[in-house]
Image (tube, helix red, strand yellow):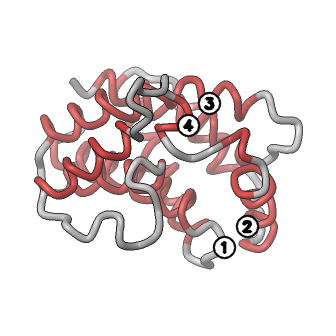
């Protein structure tokens, strides 16, 4: 049986690596970091009774070069607004017209002492920032906070984002990542 500390380490590394993938896919360390996290995710999935296949498939996949990965990322998430990487794009619009998810994330980050949120030019409800914040909460051993944040934000929109990503014929590497994201959702259910 895996200890709580090892479980936290595996979860933190998974969220951290996925955050890097959705923020800076072109960085040379992104793919090796993701590969390491997939091994940790596979072990954790096995331990929790979750299907490890999505993690193993990505870990054993011939990885793209950073340039190929960046090209696919640009085509899917930057040049095509159909796969926006923000919670606001995937959740019902607020009648006020305000980006409520973004504002709620900003407030949560500020309350956690991350007052620079929003200053880096990325919406606070961006997938990469939500994943990174969850990783930070796990690292700080605020497991209740991590679960609450996951439930209030990522769980609200990841399932529909995953489905949309799976339907894209031009998604190669990121189609496998969609399966990984679904596996992460399953892990998070089991970590309650």
In terms of image quadrants, where is residue 118? bottom left
Q: Single out the residue that lies furthest toward the bottom.
A: 28
Give the mark nearest the N terminus, 3 or 2. 2
Spatial separation of the CA atoms under disc 3 and disc 2: 19 Å
Which callout, 4 or 1, points at the residue further toward the start of the chain? 1
**Label 2 belongs to which residue?**
70
Q: Secondary structure at mark 3?
A: helix
Residue 154 x, y percent position in the rendering: 40, 34
Label 3: few (<14), some or many (≥20) within 10 Å? some
Q: Earlier in the sequence, mark 3 or mark 4?
A: 4
Q: Earlier in the sequence, mark 1 or mark 2?
A: 1
The residue to which callout 3 is attached is 162
Write down the quadrant of residue 74 in the picture. Answer: bottom right
Q: Are marks 1 and 2 in contact (CB under 8 Å)?
A: yes
Q: CA distance from mark 1 to mark 3?
A: 22 Å
Which residue has dot 1 on it?
26
Q: Is residue 14 above or below residue 24?
A: above
Q: Nearer the viewer, residue 59 or 121?
A: 121
Q: CA distance from mark 3 to mark 4?
A: 13 Å
Q: CA distance from mark 4 to mark 1?
A: 24 Å
Give the total of numbered labels: 4
**CA–CA distance between discs 1 and 2?**
5 Å
Vertical side of 64 occupied by 59: above or below: above
Q: Going from the N terminus, do you reach mark 1 or mark 3 first?
A: 1
Which of the pair 50/18 is nearer the observer? 18
- The span from disc 2 to disc 4 (Cα, nearest Å) is 22 Å
Residue linked to disc 4: 89
Q: Position of residue 112 (x, y in %)?
A: 13, 56
């Amino acid at each position: 049986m895996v200890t709580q500390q090892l479980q936290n380490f595996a979860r933190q590394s998974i969220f951290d690596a996925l955050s890097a993938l959705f923020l800076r896919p072109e960085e040379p360390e992104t793919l090796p970091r993701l590969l390491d996290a997939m091994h940790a995710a596979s072990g954790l999935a096995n331990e929790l009774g979750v299907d490890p296949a999505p993690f193993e498939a990505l870990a054993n996949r011939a990885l793209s070069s950073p340039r190929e990965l960046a090209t696919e990322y640009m085509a899917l998430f930057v040049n095509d607004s159909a796969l926006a990487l923000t919670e606001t794009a995937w959740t019902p619009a607020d009648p006020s017209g305000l980006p409520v998810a973004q504002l709620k994330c900003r407030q949560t980050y500020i309350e956690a002492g991350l007052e620079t949120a929003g200053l880096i030019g990325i919406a606070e409800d961006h997938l990469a920032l939500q994943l990174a914040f969850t990783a930070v909460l796990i690292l700080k051993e605020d497991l209740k906070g991590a679960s609450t944040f996951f439930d209030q934000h990522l769980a609200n929109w990841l399932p529909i984002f995953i489905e949309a990503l799976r339907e894209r014929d031009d998604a190669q590497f990121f189609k496998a990542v969609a399966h990984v994201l679904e596996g992460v959702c399953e892990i998070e259910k089991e970590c309650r």
